[in-house]
Amino acid sequence: MISSEQVGKRIARLRKEKHMSQEQLAEQLNVSAQAVSKWETGKSLPETSSLPLLSSLLGHSIDSILLPQKLVVLSAVYTDGQAAYDVTHFVNQLIVGNRLNLVVNKLTFPESIKSDRLKLLLLKYETPSGVYATYVFNDDLLTIDLHSTGYASSPSELDIVFAAYGNEQANRNVLNKIKHYEFFQWKQLTASHKLFPSLIDNNGNDYLLLLYLNEEGIHAVSCAEGEQIHYTPDRTRLFRTESPHEHCIVEGVGRLGFGRGMDCSWAGALLLSLTASGVDTTYEQIMGVSGACWRIAFTAMWDYSSTDALVAYNYSDPAFNAYGLTPIWANNLNPEERRLEKHNILESIRNHQLPIAINLRVASEWGVITGYLDAGGTLLCRSYFDDETFEKLRNDPEFLEYMKVSKGYLNVDNWPYMLVRIGNQENIPSALDNLYASFRIKVDSMNTAGNGGYNLGYKAFEAWQEGLLDDAWYRNASDKDFARRLGVNHFCMMGLTDARRSAAVYLQESLPLLVDRPGYPALSELAELYAQIAALLAGYYNCMTDPASVKSDISRQLWTREQREQQAKLLQTVAALELRGEALAQAVLEH
């Protein structure tokens, strides 16, 4: 029988592996820190509704958390010392009877690493006797059970346990040379034939690969010939750098900003990324094939996040599928994972495959990473908050000089909590298949009750109307709360107006796909319907005063009861038209 104390200890251990405090975990789960503390001390168990997100945040299955085995893999990373994939959840599923047997190769894991570097699996695991680390190279067998003891953590300076020079085809063990060089306390090691002689039969690239232990576990870092691996000042970590002056900037990436005809920041950032890689598309096409043109989300908390295309429904997978792309997500990374992910970001930029991410500057909206300076020490971007900076510093000589270096891009200020890199195009569906997929998303998303505290579809229309007509709230609200709700309302109307405008454009452009087909009359009527919806919303939104341009103490004068009632009636009308649109979309699908 598994006790709540055992479950609590498992949660605490996995949380610490992710370098999260109880407060940070609680915030992401939308629970109190006291609740997390009670879980970890065995006084209570997580609510069932919290388990899926808890599983995602900790990187372990629900069964692994609630039914902890004696053998558990705390972290598993498949890497070549540069690219890295967290495969912890996958590896834990292979444990049978407190025993893990695993042959590591390029077919083992869902993600593959395309390089000529040595590839290996780094493992940190726990048994009743303690926490250990080990590693296994491609094509080798890993076997772990309750009696296995690997490397223990290094509590002070790092301990290099393996070193190789060469590549996947030909390499030699150079650990003895590393141990010799440690005597000199060098601040960095240079991958060169002088320090690490290459094999005479190696005709490929040479790389220096180091595996080391510190108090957090086992790590791998690799650099190419001519590059360096550095020690941190406290000599507890290693990191790779290239030439200190190396930079790469993808020039000509357009500007982002609200009011530019792309008010969904996720779709706007994706547009810049796709066009930079040579994909011929438009903002309205992205909104259409992803289904984001049908989106409406609303929370009774009246939050700006309601307009985020991915906050409560998955429009991203349909978008990537429509363009034949495979996304690689890197969300909520700890510091070590960020270090590894930065190498992947730099490589993507060099390939003109620009990552998109949320919260690059100022606030939580999507943007695109456009380049880097100083070997990745500085990342550059386009964000939805650039205009203010450009306006403020347009006459600043120092800023203008820096713009020449950065090719007109601003710096990334924050490490994003959601980031996606995009690979090459392949197996692109037809435009007609994408249209059908979009209609299926429309029907599903409009009838989904809610997710994560957000109302969706018709329920979102209802919740928004109820909030507008809650006279008691508006009478009793402080000026500050009133002004904030006015701002959220304006922002949500902007997002809804932009989405339905995109839907109208997408439908009009899709009409040729069904010419001379049975579904054409329904599609034609649907295009006319959404042109009507777009006009209704635009007519109202264009008459609204932007709250950002006025002081909060006069917000009540800008947003009267009559205006709120008028908007509620508009939303009710639009929702009724949406029902007709759903019937027409179903008619197209049935043909």
Image: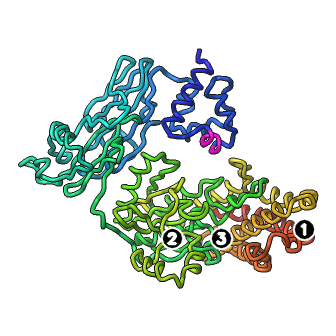
C-alpha distance separating marks 1 and 3 = 26 Å
Element on which disc 2 rests? strand
Element on which disc 1 rests? helix
The reply to whether residue 173 is visible in this rendering is no
Q: Look at the image and name its color scheme.
A: rainbow
Q: Quadrant of residue 156?
A: top left
Viewer-side residue, 576 vs 482? 482
Query: Horizontal and vertical percent for residue 449?
Result: 74, 49
Residue at the farthest bottom position: 395
Q: Nearer the viewer, mark 1 or mark 3?
A: 1
Q: Which residue is mark 1?
A: 565
Q: Quadrant of residue 484?
A: bottom right
C-alpha distance separating marks 1 and 2 = 38 Å
Q: Is residue 238 magenta?
A: no
Picture disc at residue 361: none
Q: At label 2, which amino acid type do we have?
A: Arg
Picture disc at residue 503: 3
Picture disc at residue 382: 2
